């Protein structure tokens, strides 16, 4: 870099007479030597002279007079070298008495064999009241002659001064950082996208004393923009960061960072950072990476909101080239280590540079992530665009990769025009045209198509999503899409693709649909399972059960969108992902690929949704946060997840954690109610053996349960419990009440339909270590939290190993910590009148009380009872709270009752689709939480409230359509009372959960048992 700059500087010395004391590569025209330093008049009658009448720095400037046209001004033979980028800055001021005008720096050049062009470098509105900074970047690549740099004015006769003109060559402008701090009191080249006003301000600053105030916006996309054309190279990655803060009187808003690029007259817009919440009075960083994947003739970075035109401040912007690490060439290729096509989703940037190298080395198949969807290929009716799709298909073809087409018909990313004024006939005609056009174009190149995507909704009576496709055309849109795709390319494999197929309800709804359509002769060749999972849930056995279930239909199956989030909920975030989580993720991938390898005869392809963490969609969904769900990290280096697939022996040991609630189950080999209060912690299948494991704590002993799945009995089948280093072996051949392990624990074994069950009481010698509470306990908010695990390093060391007679073994290894007993209550079979009055039906229900404080130590409490009838759970809460308030805009900070219901009692560290948080304020206002949008439960609650002396009554009816309610059914259940004082929540108390995380996960809720009486 230094050598290049020195050569450029030497060349410039021959062009102009004066150099400043700046760095050697900078060329400055300051007019302090009394000459024009090479600048001359542009246009007849124009005069260019040096004058002491005004100066930005020093004592002189360049005065331009005698102009009679806007293009008249001062010019110089431009000191530009083809292929080199430059930053050009100057200061301008009008002669006293002149009206405000736009002063611009422009380049004139004539490309060889072409016409003379005029290219704007910088411009600003200039007045006679002070000096205004002009600044911009410039680079040209075509061989050109007569290259001039000149200053002009929108006022044809205006007179102006120029001073301190600096030309800085950038040896490689695409590698030089770009930054803005606004400390010089100017906008530093940021300009408005429309009507917005940009004004340097000392009212707020992230660092230093100034920022850029943005006001007067005309639309959500209107605001500050910075021209970065020539500062990014195609195929290179850049890290962008900017700090934003809400402006005066703005109380809430979301801001994001985007890129506008143009090729010809066609603009495109890409998100770098999805809009984030910006709390009032706080600076929030927007940071992300961007890879330029196109040839462009315009490139700009800008800040926008998702809605609204509120004012905001911008400060400390930076854009830096990210030097890529070479991909590892001394590790095995993924595609060589699996017995099926190993695929990756990709977008155009992923096919360039080191990302493209990684794809070519490790993957034998690809799925274009967005480039073949309807909005990308037919944004307007009959206007097809295939440039991006062709690019990715050609990339895959050159590298011998199998291509999956994604997707022909989907409820999302389909332009509005498709459904406008459409009856069934017109809609199916549009669908047929689209499908036939795409499949025909790529006939013989794309091996498999996701013909329809996400058409199942297990919460509907018939299991079908109520999309616009379905509302207008019913099942015929699915039938038509498959028929036309098959006609267009009979050799392509046609798939129906969906998410959550690993969950039983979704699995069965999709199964029924595929069975029905295949029975009608619809040419469905296969089922795609997306498998967007997390590090804990669901167990690998659920994935295996899904593959085995669909195998009975005789269809091909593919895993189409695999990733493993490090989060178990939709709110938490890490500043840095703990290394132990990445190890846990590696073991999770190992378990999943064990399933895929066992099922390889039924599974033709496994595709991960992106080749490396830096391109994962989970960086922006469901919220912007650091996530690492894939096999390679941000630098494209192999993670534990990679080794979990390729060579699990390279994985560090995984230390799992399990709570052992207080309890004393009877050790007789029978599974009593005590064990059913919680689900078993899964021990993944190896060979034919798998298991589930639980523990209960009592003084200096652990009660342990192992539910073993092993259909073939053998004399060497056994479970080994190792507690604090001491092994205790319980053989399958043991008889109830007499089986003994090493050291003589009390144990019992009983056969089950799929294997056998082991119960044991094992001495620990000391009290089992006490669980410390989660670090977020007591915060008592529904706001985002930073996840941490304060139990790390505590607990009793436990290993549970299941071994079959063939010698295969599988194990659970980790720390077991004590916890309070899981509280159990019951709901009688009665139907109350929902009127806020405590009628006689409630007398059959036992009463529980909220007494577990998660915020404060006193305040409002409730007596709670439950009933059930049909598919409805009824809950009555009688709240003691003499002072009631709904002043806070946040519902969790109002006086209210929260009812938590998990129909499956899954006790998961996150919400499943039918889990619900139902909040009812004292005035009857209902708000519902659950999964990221609570879509599966938000319409399932009704409530009536009534204020009474000293408090209020809440009577709620919650519909639970996803299960059949019957005596003996166990529901995950909890109740919470929020106590508000004015606009603040001052207390919160639950029945069972002491973690203050009930709104995030269901793992510490109590249990409600339905009874007949």
Image (cartoon, grey):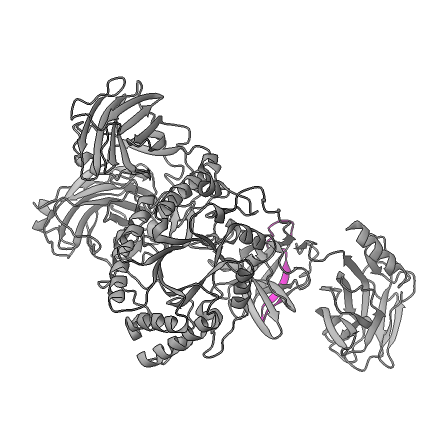
Horizontal placement of 409 versus 43: left or right? left
Q: Nearer the viewer, residue 570 or 589?
A: 589
Residue 915, position as x, y percentages in the image: 28, 51
Asked whether residue 828 is in view, the answer is: yes
For the record, the magenta segment spans 192-209
Whether residue 707 sits left or right of residue 415 in the image: it is left
Q: At 24% from the left edge and 47% from the top edge, which residue is drawn?
A: 904
Q: Position of residue 916 (x, y in %)?
A: 28, 51
Rendered location of residue 997, percent (x, y):
34, 43
In the rendered image of this protein, does residue 201 appear above or below residue 43? above
| Residue 994: % across, % down | 31, 37
**Residue 941, relative to residue 637: is it above or below?**
below
Does residue 390 lie above or below 24 as drawn? Answer: below
Name the image quarter holding residue 155: bottom right
Instruction: Find residue 57 and report its image quarter.
Output: bottom right
Query: In the rendered view of the protein, which quadrant contains the C terminus?
Result: top left
Tell me if residue 857 comes above or below residue 609 in the rendering: above
């Amino acid at each position: 870099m230094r050598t290049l700059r020195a050569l450029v500087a030497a060349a410039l010395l021959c062009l102009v007479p004066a150099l400043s004391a700046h760095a050697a590569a900078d060329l400055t025209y300051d007019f302090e030597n009394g000459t024009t330093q090479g600048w001359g008049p542009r246009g007849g009658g124009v005069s260019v002279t040096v004058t002491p009448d005004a100066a930005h720095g020093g004592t002189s400037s360049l005065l331009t007079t005698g102009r009679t046209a806007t293009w008249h001004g001062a010019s110089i033979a431009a000191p530009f070298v083809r292929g080199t980028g430059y930053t050009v800055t100057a200061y301008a001021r009008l002669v006293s008495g002149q009206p405000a005008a736009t002063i611009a720096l422009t380049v004139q050049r004539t490309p060889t064999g072409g016409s003379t062009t005029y290219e704007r470098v910088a411009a600003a509105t200039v007045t006679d009241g002070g000096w205004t900074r002009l600044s911009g970047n410039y680079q040209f690549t075509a061989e050109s002659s007569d290259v001039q740099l000149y200053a002009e004015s929108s006022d044809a006769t205006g007179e102006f001064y120029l001073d301190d003109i600096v030309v800085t060559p950038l040896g490689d402008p695409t590698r030089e950082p770009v930054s803005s701090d606004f400390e010089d009191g100017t906008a530093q080249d940021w300009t408005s996208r429309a009507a917005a006003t940009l004004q340097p301000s000392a009212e707020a600053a992230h660092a230093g004393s100034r920022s850029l105030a943005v006001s007067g916006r005309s639309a959500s996309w209107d605001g500050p923009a910075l021209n970065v054309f020539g500062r990014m190279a195609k195929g290179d990655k850049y890290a962008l960061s900017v700090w934003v803060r809400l402006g005066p009187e703005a109380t809430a808003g979301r801001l994001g960072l985007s890129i506008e690029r143009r090729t010809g007259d066609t603009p495109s817009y890409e998100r770098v950072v999805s809009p984030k919440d910006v709390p009032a009075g706080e600076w929030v960083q927007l940071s992300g990476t961007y890879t330029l994947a196109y040839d462009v003739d315009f490139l700009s970075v800008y800040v926008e909101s998702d809605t609204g035109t509120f004012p905001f401040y911008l400060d400390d912007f930076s854009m830096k080239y990210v030097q890529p690490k070479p991909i590892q060439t001394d590790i095995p290729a993924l595609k060589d280590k699996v017995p099926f096509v190993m695929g990756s989703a990709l977008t155009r940037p992923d096919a360039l540079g080191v990302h493209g190298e990684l794809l070519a080395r490790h993957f034998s198949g690809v799925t274009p992530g967005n480039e073949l969807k309807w909005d990308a290929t037919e944004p307007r009716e009959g206007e097809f665009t295939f440039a991006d799709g062709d690019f990715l298909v050609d990339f895959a073809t050159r590298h011998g990769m199998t291509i999956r087409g994604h997707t022909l018909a989907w409820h999302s990313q389909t332009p509005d025009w498709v459904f406008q004024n459409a009856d069934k006939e017109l809609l199916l005609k549009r669908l047929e045209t689209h499908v036939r056009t795409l499949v025909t174009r790529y006939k013989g190149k794309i091996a498999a198509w996701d013909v329809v995507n996400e058409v199942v909704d297990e919460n509907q009576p018939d299991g079908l999503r109520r999309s616009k496709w379905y509302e207008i055309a019913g099942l015929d849109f699915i039938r038509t899409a498959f028929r036309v795709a098959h006609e267009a390319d009979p050799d392509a494999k046609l798939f129906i693709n969906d998410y959550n197929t690993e969950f039983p309800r979704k699995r069965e709804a999709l199964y029924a649909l595929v069975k029905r359509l295949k029975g009608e002769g619809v040419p469905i060749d296969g089922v795609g399972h997306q498998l967007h999972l997390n590090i804990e849930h669901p167990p690998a056995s659920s994935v295996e059960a899904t593959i085995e279930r669909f195998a009975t239909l005789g269809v091909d199956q593919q895993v189409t969108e695999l990733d493993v989030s490090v989060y178990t909920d939709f709110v938490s975030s890490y500043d840095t992902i703990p290394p132990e989580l990445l190890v846990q993720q590696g073991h999770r991938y190992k378990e999943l690929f064990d399933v895929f390898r066992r099922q390889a005869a039924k599974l033709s392809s496994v595709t991960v949704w992106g080749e490396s963490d830096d391109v994962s969609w989970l960086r922006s969904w469901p919220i912007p946060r650091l996530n690492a769900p894939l096999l390679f990290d941000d630098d494209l280096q192999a993670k534990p997840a990679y080794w979990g697939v390729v060579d699990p022996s390279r994985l560090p040991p995984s230390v799992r954690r399990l709570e052992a609630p207080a309890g004393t189950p009877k050790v007789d080999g029978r599974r009593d109610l005590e064990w059913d209060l919680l689900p078993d912690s899964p021990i993944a299948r190896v060979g034919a053996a798998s298991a589930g494991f639980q523990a209960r704590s009592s003084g200096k002993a652990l009660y342990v349960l192992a539910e073993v799945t092993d259909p073939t009995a053998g004399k060497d089948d056994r479970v080994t419990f190792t507690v604090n280093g001491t092994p205790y072996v319980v053989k399958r051949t043991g008889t109830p009440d007499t089986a003994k392990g090493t050291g003589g624990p009390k144990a019992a074994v009983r056969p089950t339909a799929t294997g056998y069950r082991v119960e044991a009481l094992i001495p620990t010698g000391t009290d089992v270590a006490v669980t410390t509470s989660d670090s977020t306990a007591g915060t008592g908010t529904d706001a985002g939290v930073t996840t941490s695990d304060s139990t790390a390093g505590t607990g009793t060391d436990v290993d549970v190993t299941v071994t079959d007679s063939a010698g295969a073994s599988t194990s659970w290894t980790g720390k077991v910590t004590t916890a309070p007993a899981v509280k159990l209550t019951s709901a009688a079979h009665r139907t109350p009148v929902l009127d806020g009055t405590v009628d006689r039906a409630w007398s059959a229900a036992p009463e529980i009380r909220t007494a577990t404080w998660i915020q404060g130590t006193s305040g409002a409490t409730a007596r709670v009872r439950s009933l059930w009838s049909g598919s409805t759970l009824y809950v009555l809460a009688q709240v003691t709270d003499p002072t009631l308030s709904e002043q806070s805009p946040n519902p969790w900070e109002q006086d209210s009752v929260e009812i938590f219901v998990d129909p499956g009692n899954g006790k998961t560290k996150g919400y499943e689709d039918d889990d619900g948080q139902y909040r009812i304020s004292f005035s009857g206002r209902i708000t519902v939480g659950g999964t990221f949008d609570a879509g599966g439960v938000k319409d399932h609650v009704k409530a009536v409230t009534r204020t009474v002396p000293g408090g209020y009554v809440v009577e709620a009816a919650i519909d639970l359509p996803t299960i059949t309610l019957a005596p003996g059914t166990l529901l995950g259940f909890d109740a919470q009372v929020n106590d508000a004082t004015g606009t603040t929540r001052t207390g919160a108390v639950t029945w069972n959960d002491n973690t203050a995380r009930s709104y995030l996960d269901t793992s510490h809720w109590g249990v409600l048992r339905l009874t007949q009486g």
